Every structure is written in structure tokens, then in C-alpha cells.
Image (cartoon, rainbow, N blue to C red):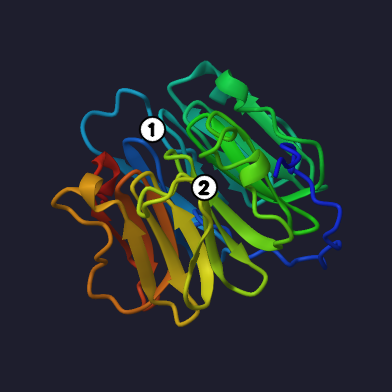
């Protein structure tokens, strides 16, 4: 039966309690198209730390010219990176001119797409900026607690726990938005990939993926991974879940992963955070010194 294609807001869901959102994927470590960044803890900082970035090849875009200061969250795009300072101000750097003038105000989270970024303001408003082709910045109105961008699209979690998705690839039978959004499900976190697949962490700690799930035979289906999870991350050819016991579980399209299979993490048994992009996975070890490990394919996996 036909369904309402606009399901960006689900009024049947109750308003969630303040602070319900899960830990944000990509807060302390992030992977871009050709580079990666992480926040290293420093003494006397109440939260966050200093930025360190790496890449393969020459830094023609200025991606390694990181700003000084203490940061609490970072997100890498294709030719740019955005981060939030400890005073909640937003700063961006990289190749494009728009990174020189990020929006003012207090932000609690930022996510970077191919050539744009979206930030969640302290009051829950979502502000998207940069180059915005194919509806990349056409987020619905509403109060958000989290946002995840990939390519020229985005998904977010609203204050009632519903998921909203927009931009390139969100519509159609194998899209990740509209009629394909899970109905009646409350999320604490969502993660969007460039392969038209989105994954979310539900209030019951389940990992749910929908859209064009290339690791499984039927496009557009809803896929639920067994077990309880603390964080999810969707890449182009791989998606991972950080289980409640802090072990990693990754899956993907075996026909596109190649020899450097990102589904097999290093021998480290426990992790605190995971992030993916394309066929690359990076995660932070639980044990001190909380090292960043990256594996799989892609130019961003080489770290300092």
C-alpha cells in the first residue's frame, strides 16, 4: 500500500528525555575522503584535546593545517574538516572558500559531507552550510540532537527520537529517506553512508540499517543486527557496530572490499569509538594510551 513519502517527522513518538542521545560517532576520531583527524587528550583540559590530522600523499588542500586550541568534536569531509572548540564555537579549514566563514553561535555537534557541513546548535536548530548541490542542505525543520552527513545528503535524530533524512539518494525505492524510514522506531544515534544506506542505534540498543544495504540481497529492506550496541557507523562498503561489551562487529559487501577487508579489526579486544568511511575503519582502543587504529582500504587509513 502507498505510504506518505514525507516521514521526516513522526508525531506518534513521544518527546524523549533530555540527554537521551548516544555518544556521537566520529566525535574523537573521523575519516574523510583522503584524510583523518583525531582529538588527543591533554593535561588540564576538562574535556576534549588538541587536533592531529593525517593523510596520504601531498597536502595540497591544507587539510593538515589544523588550528590551535582545545576541541571537543571533529568531522572530516572530502577537502575540508570542521570541529567544535571547547567554547562551543565552530571552526572549519581546507580547500573550499566557504570553510573560512562558518556560522556563528554555540554548537554541540557537527558533521561533514562531501562539500558541506551541518551543525546542531545548542538550541537544537540544525544549520547546514557550504556547497549544497542535490538538496544536501535541505534538512527539515525541527529540533535535532544529532546529525550525520555523507556525500550530498544527511540524516539526523530529532528530539522525539525519530530519524529524518534528506538530500541525494534519500528518495526512491532503495533510498534511505521518505517511505523507507523506519516507522515507530526511536533512535539515539544515526549514521549515513555514501552507498544510500543508513544505520541507527535504537533506544533498546539495537542496530538497525535501511536503504540500499549492499551487504544483503534485497535493496530497500530493513536489517536488524543481533545483539546490543553502544554506537553504529556506516561506510560505503562496510558498516560497524560497537557492541555493549565494547567489541566490534563489522559487515559489508565482500565483492567491493578487496584484499584489505575492513570487517576484520585488529586483535585489540575492546574499543571506545568507531568511525567508517568508504572501506576504511578507524577505532580508538579502550586501553591506554587510547591509540587510534585504522584498517581496510582508502587513503585515510595511514595515521601518524
Query: Which residue has dot 2 on it?
Result: 74
| Residue situated in front as seen by the camera: 106 or 147 | 147
Quadrant into which the N terminus falls: top right
Label number found at residue 97: none
Residue 225 locus on image (x, y percent): 47, 69
Q: CA distance from mark 2 to mark 1?
A: 13 Å
Q: Secondary structure at mark 2?
A: strand
Q: Work out whether residue 131 can be spotted.
A: no
Q: Residue at x 59, y 54 (%)?
A: 190
Q: Is residue 268 above or below residue 27?
A: below
Q: Residue at x 56, y 71 (%)?
A: 206
- Asked if residue 258 lies left or right of residue 210, the reply is left
Residue 250 locus on image (x, y percent): 35, 64
| Residue situated in front as seen by the camera: 44 or 29 | 29
- Asked if residue 121 lies left or right of residue 187, the reply is right
Q: Decide: few, some or many residues near mark 2? Use Cα within 10 Å; few <14, some 14-19, many ≥20.
A: many
Q: Quadrant of residue 127?
A: top right
| Residue situated in front as seen by the camera: 285 or 253 | 253
Numbered-mark total: 2
Query: Which residue has dot 1 on it?
Result: 63
Amino acid at each position: 500500500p502507498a505510504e506518505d513519502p514525507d516521514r521526516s517527522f513522526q508525531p506518534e513518538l513521544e518527546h524523549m528525555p533530555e540527554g537521551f542521545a548516544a555518544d556521537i560517532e566520529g566525535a574523537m576520531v573521523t575519516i574523510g575522503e583522503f584524510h583523518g583527524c583525531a582529538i588527543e587528550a591533554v593535561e588540564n583540559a576538562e574535556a576534549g584535546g588538541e587536533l592531529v590530522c593525517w593523510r596520504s600523499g601531498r597536502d595540497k588542500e591544507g587539510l593538515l593545517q589544523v588550528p590551535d586550541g582545545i576541541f571537543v568534536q571533529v568531522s572530516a569531509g572530502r577537502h575540508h574538516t570542521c570541529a567544535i572548540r571547547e567554547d562551543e564555537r565552530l571552526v572549519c579549514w581546507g580547500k573550499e572558500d566557504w570553510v573560512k566563514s562558518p556560522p556563528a553561535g554555540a554548537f554541540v555537534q557537527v558533521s561533514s559531507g562531501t562539500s558541506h557541513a551541518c551543525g546542531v546548535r545548542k538550541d537544537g536548530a540544525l544549520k547546514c552550510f557550504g556547497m549544497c548541490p542535490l538538496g544536501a542542505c535541505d534538512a527539515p525543520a525541527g529540533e535535532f540532537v544529532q546529525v550525520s552527513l555523507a556525500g550530498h545528503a544527511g540524516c539526523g535524530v530529532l528530539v522525539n527520537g525519530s530519524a529524518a533524512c534528506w538530500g541525494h539518494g534519500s528518495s526512491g525505492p532503495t533510498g534511505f529517506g521518505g517511505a523507507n524510514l523506519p516507522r515507530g522506531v526511536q533512535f539515539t544515534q544515526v549514521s549515513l553512508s555514501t552507498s544510500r544506506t543508513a544505520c541507527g542505534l535504537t533506544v533498546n540498543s539495537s542496530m538497525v540499517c535501511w536503504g540500499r544495504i549492499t551487504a544483503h540481497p534485497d535493496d530497500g529492506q530493513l536489517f536488524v543486527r543481533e545483539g546490543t550496541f553502544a554506537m553504529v557507523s556506516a561506510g560505503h562498503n562496510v558498516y560497524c557496530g560497537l557492541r555493549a561489551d565494547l567489541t566490534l562487529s563489522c559487515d559489508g559487501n565482500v565483492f567491493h572490499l578487496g584484499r584489505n577487508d575492513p570487517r576484520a579489526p585488529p586483535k585489540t579486544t575492546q574499543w571506545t569509538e568507531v568511525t567508517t568511511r568508504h572501506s576504511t575503519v578507524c577505532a580508538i582502543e579502550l586501553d591506554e594510551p587510547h591509540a587510534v587504529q585504522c584498517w581496510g582500504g582508502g587513503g585515510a587509513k595511514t595515521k601518524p
